Amino acid sequence: MEFATDELTQQVGRTARDFANQYIRPYVMEWDEKQTFPHEVFKELGRLGMMGVVVPEEYGGSGLSYLEYVTIIREISAVCGAVGLSLAAHNSLCTGHILAFGNEGQKKKYLPRLATGEALGAWGLTEANTGSDAGNMGCTAVKAGDHWVINGTKNWITHGISGDIAVVVTRTGEARARNNATAFIVERGTPGFTGGKKENKLGMRASETAEMVFDQCRVPDANRLGEVGDGFKQALAVLDGGRISIAALSLGIAKGAFEAALQYSKERHQFDQPISNFQGISFKLADMATEIAAAELLTFQAADRKNRHLPVTRESAMAKYYASEVAVRVATDAVQIFGGYGYTKDFPVEKFYRDSKLCTIGEGTSEIQKIVIAREVLKD
């Protein structure tokens, strides 16, 4: 399916697909087994303009739209969800936060490095005890002259160790008070800022997930993003865009699993015929194809609204919720179609199966998405 028939969007998709097949596919299982974060791949993606897809050209980006962006994430993720996840986190979260809320000086200083892949981005909101309950975060920033002193730990952070530039949301007011959070840009190498434990994950193993630790970390007030107290509002807006990218990530994983299962069903013979001839298999394929098509429409609808600067809270939550659940269902059915082979690492569907689950958790669980959707629906 092609929601957008614009030649540019299609060309960008072909470029991403060709890159993934040449530079990612041969190494997918090696990176997964060794939990290797492939730095050089992201340097190459930067040279292709895919590390700053929607960043305007004046800041070193590609100046493309959200339609091209979700197309890139979809095509990369159809080969490797882990690379797709890291690409999405870099573009939507860290880079996206600075693009949306940075002042002109901050944009000129940081965006060119991020957009070209010279620097890798990280974004810190989640903590060990405050996943969905971000208003009760323990990582604090206290004003000290023309600096802020940050103390605390962020958990489950993509590129928590390897990220060169981090946007960190801290508590600057009382716990659970309104407007109690403020965001800062913190560069790797700043005294008191270190990477912590790297998580040993079920899936997405080539995408680094780790702690960020702040111990008396002094950050200049010039690195504050927006007004004091606006951090949580900013984070919610950033997540609206980020959820579209997770929908695209989910879509790519589902697409990759479906294509593998479809091909296998035509090649695998039982009772002297391909298993795709059996209704039990063909009906699974029909359900998978239909759900992928529906997820794609939701994802591109949200991207289209984002392009037109329309509210996307409802649409991004719907796309993320539905596409992530579809990814899990499609990957599960793909393993079933492969049978015993699907349970081995000789075929790609077991990795799609493992990778898919994170999509229902990261950037707001499916349960949180339903809360957001219900709240938006009840406004009508």
Image: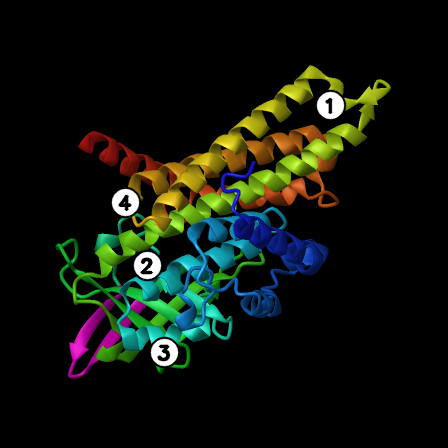
Lower sequence index among marks 3 and 1 = 3
| Label 1, residues with CA under 10 Å away: few <14, some 14-19, many ≥20 | many
Residue 234 drawn above or below residue 183: above
Q: Amino acid at mark 2?
A: Leu
Q: Nearer the viewer, mark 2 or mark 3?
A: 3
Q: Nearer the viewer, mark 2 or mark 4?
A: 4
Q: Nearer the viewer, mark 3 or mark 1?
A: 3
> Can residue 210 be seen here?
yes
Lower sequence index among marks 2 and 3 = 3
Magenta run includes residue 88: no
> Residue at (28%, 53%) from the top-left corner?
237
Q: Secondary structure at mark 4?
A: loop
| Label 3 to label 1: alpha-carbon separation | 55 Å
Residue 62 drawn above or below residue 188: above
Region of the chain picked out in magenta, as a range: 139-152
Q: Are marks 3 and 1 in contact (CB under 8 Å)?
A: no
Residue named by callout 2: 125
| Label 4, residues with CA under 10 Å away: few <14, some 14-19, many ≥20 | few
Q: Amino acid at mark 4?
A: Pro
Lower sequence index among marks 2 and 4 = 2
> Residue at (61%, 30%) from the top-left corner?
333
> Residue at (43%, 34%) from the top-left corner?
322
Residue named by callout 4: 311
Q: Nearer the viewer, mark 4 or mark 1?
A: 4
Q: Are marks 2 and 4 in contact (CB under 8 Å)?
A: no
Residue named by callout 3: 109
| Label 2 to label 1: alpha-carbon separation | 46 Å
Residue named by callout 1: 276
Q: Secondary structure at mark 1?
A: helix
